Amino acid sequence: MKIGFIGLGSMACAMIGGMLQKGAAQKEDILGSAKTRETCRRVQEQYGICICEDNTQTAAASDILFLAVKPHLLGEVIGQIRQAVRPDTLVVSIAAGKSLAFLEDAFGERRKLIRCMPNTPALVLEGCTAVCPGEAVTAKELDLVLGLLGSFGTAQVVPERLMDAVVGVSGSSPAYVFLFIEALADGAVAAGMPRSQAYQFAAQSVLGSAKLVLETGRHPGELKDMVCSPGGTTIRAVKVLEEKGLRGAVMDAVEACVEASRGL
């Protein structure tokens, strides 16, 4: 089975790296193409995958074809490859905001189409991917793609109407979390901690907190209350965060991201 990538940017590399680390695919089974020779050279040196001469060659040789290009380029790329894609090829788009209807219109005919939204923690096997299959995709084919996407984290089927919300809550949210980690570390640096150590403490605390939510199944508010002793240090910090509007700011950020996705 040949797995093709058109577009070899950060997200595609995260997916390729995750698949290879987990053993879901071998480097000789992955092929790809990109806009610049420099990108192709870098990815080939890093992962050892096969680099095709152009997008058409990648499309023609792939059993599963990932379209990993920016949303504004998706229509142009599909125009280049639609005659080369075989009828039985599974075409998986990771472009935010581009619906299954858009994909089918761009191809001009019924195709085996899947829309998904992964995120960059795939590179360390902790990705979160939402998957929405088109009507022509069989249950067996969907399971095949879920297996690949699940090799570098979690992959769940969602209705298409929720895909823009997925962009806000997981697709783009690593950036919010990195910003939070940086802010935590800055606070520790201000209190005298060396920066490299501050980043380690902040990042590990975020990682551990996330695992508590996922592995205990407890409500985040309940877990927060466990840390907030009466009259203690934590509740004073939480009070400041509430006064500064952390909760509302995060909700507004997700809403802005969702609206941007809907407008693509």
Image (cartoon, rainbow, N blue to C red):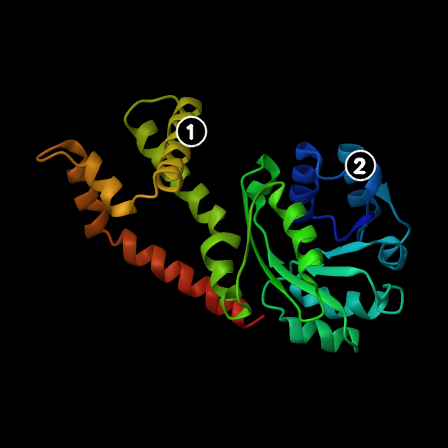
**On screen, 28 above or below 189?**
below
Quadrant of the rendered image containing residue 49: top right
Type of amino acid at the residue the image marks with label 1: Tyr
- Quarter in which the C terminus is drawn: bottom right
State left or right for residue 80 relative to residue 165.
Answer: right
Residue 172 visible in the shown view:
no
Report, in whole angstroms, how far the alpha carbon at label 2 lies from the one at label 1: 33 Å
Check disc 2 and report the residue beneath it.
Answer: 27
Check disc 1 and report the residue beneath it.
Answer: 199
Q: Where is residue 240 in the image (x, y as percent from the top left)?
A: 19, 45
> Which residue is at the front of the view, 186 or 70?
70
Type of amino acid at the residue the image marks with label 2: Lys
Residue 202 visible in the shown view:
yes
Q: Residues within 10 Å of mark 2 (few under 14, many from 20)?
A: some
> Which residue is at the front of the view, 218 or 204?
218
**On screen, 105 above or below 49?**
below
Q: Where is residue 176 in the image (x, y as percent from the top left)?
A: 43, 48
